[in-house]
Amino acid sequence: MWWIYALLSAFFAALTAIFAKIGIKNVDTDLATAIRTVIILVLGWAFVFFKGSAGSIGSLTKQNWIFLLLSGCATGLSWIFYFKALQLGEVSQVAPVDKLSVAIAIVLAVIFLHEPVTWKSAIGALMIIGGTFVLILK
């Protein structure tokens, strides 16, 4: 079941690149990111209230809060740089290079989360890294 959500994530991420490229034309990318963030904020809280999970906010630990805050900061910085890259480059270049995050996430998961690395994930990560260099040096 996880893979269905992952495919939906990939599909909507692809739409994000196309919509953003059109939406940031002649717009300050930081302003565009701020507007996008408000939309995500409203949508995220709508899901929380629709599912009825707002009541569990009190059960979050200090560690939950710290790492969710760090994750939010990383996401915000990612979006800021992504929008700037989209404004300066082509979607066909920026979107695949952005996916270098997949290879970086695999390496970081091995280092910090002690997740095992399989040959398939290692080869996949190396292919992503190689493809990124091909696109950058294009």
Image (tube, rainbow, N blue to C red):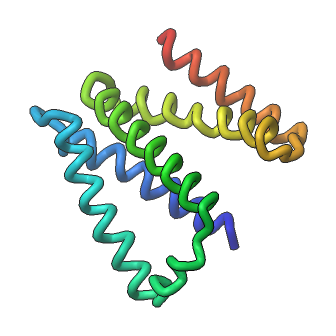
Q: Name which quarter of the figure residue 106 lies in.
A: top right
- The residue located at (51%, 59%) in the rendering is 9
Report whether 67 appears left or right of 114.
Answer: left
- The residue located at (41%, 29%) in the rendering is 94
Count every numbered label the image shows and give the total: 0
Image position, residue 107 (x, y; %): 74, 33
Report whether 59 appears left or right of 109.
Answer: left
Residue 134's place in the image compared with 57, above or below, is: above
Image position, residue 41 (x, y; %): 32, 64
Image position, residue 56 (x, y; %): 54, 82
Quadrant placement of the N terminus: bottom right
Image position, residue 38 (x, y; %): 25, 59
- The residue located at (49%, 15%) in the rendering is 136
Residue 56's place in the image compared with 85, above or below, is: below
- The residue located at (87%, 40%) in the rendering is 117
| Depth order, front residue of 57/51 | 57
